Amino acid sequence: MTNTFIDSASITVPETKPKPAFAVPHAQKQKSNPDTIVVPTETDSAGDAPAALRMLHFRLVQAGTKNNDLCLTMIDACIETGLDTDKQIRDAMVAMGLKVGNFMPKLKYETGNAAHHRYRLDAAGRYSLR
């Protein structure tokens, strides 16, 4: 058995795609190039969600916030910015890439009149923070 030496110039390394430094929901990726991450800006006006909500969502995702905390924080932010009906909250959250099955049950569960509920729902169908 003989030792064989390989010249470093003859080694071929396969090209790999760089991964994003953080997780980004599917809805925030551009359709033409799924590897390009869309970073919202304060003056961005595209989509149904206000720019401030999309920026908050982006920063929470970038920070690695857990899904439960992310959903509750985003619902709070929606209500605070005036998106306070089921449809408005749902549309804004879906526009940010969140799944209805993740946040709507939390909204319903946290709604009531007891002291331990986060949200109140009035007769007109508008949510408010307790």
Image: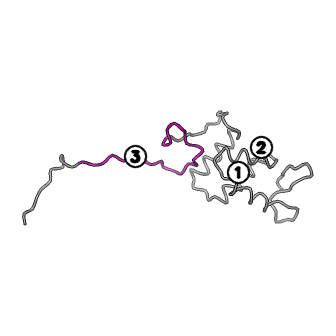
In the picture of the structure, the residue carrying the numbered disc 3 is 17
Q: Residue furthest left?
A: 2
Q: Amino acid at mark 1?
A: Met
Q: Magenta stretch containing residue 89, yes or no?
A: no
- Foreground disc of the pair 1, 3: 3
Residue 11 is situated, as x and y percent measured from the top left of the image, at 21, 49
Q: Identify the mark nearer the N-term, 1 or 3.
A: 3
Q: Main secondary structure of the magenta part?
A: loop
Which stretch is magenta? 12-35
In the image, residue 69 above or below residue 7? below
Q: Residue at x 40, y 46 (%)?
A: 17
Q: Residue at x 51, y 36 (%)?
A: 32
Left or right placement of residue 26 versus residue 81 in this view:
left
Q: CA separation, marks 2 and 1?
A: 10 Å
- SS for dot 3: loop
Q: Identify the mark nearer the N-term, 2 or 3.
A: 3
- SS for dot 1: helix
Q: Amino acid at mark 3?
A: Lys
Residue 74: mark: 1
In the picture of the structure, the residue carrying the numbered disc 2 is 81
Question: Which quadrant is the N terminus positioned in?
Answer: bottom left
- SS for dot 2: loop
- Judge the density around disc 2: few (<14), some (14-19), many (≥20) Cα neighbours within 10 Å: few
- Judge the density around disc 3: few (<14), some (14-19), many (≥20) Cα neighbours within 10 Å: few
Q: CA separation, marks 1 and 3?
A: 32 Å
Front-most of residues 28 and 40: 28
Question: Given contact means CB atoms under 8 Å apart, are the residues at marks 2 and 1 in contact?
Answer: no
Residue 95 is situated, as x and y percent measured from the top left of the image, at 67, 43
Question: Which quadrant is the C terminus positioned in?
Answer: bottom right
Q: Residue furthest right?
A: 123
Q: CA separation, marks 2 and 3?
A: 39 Å
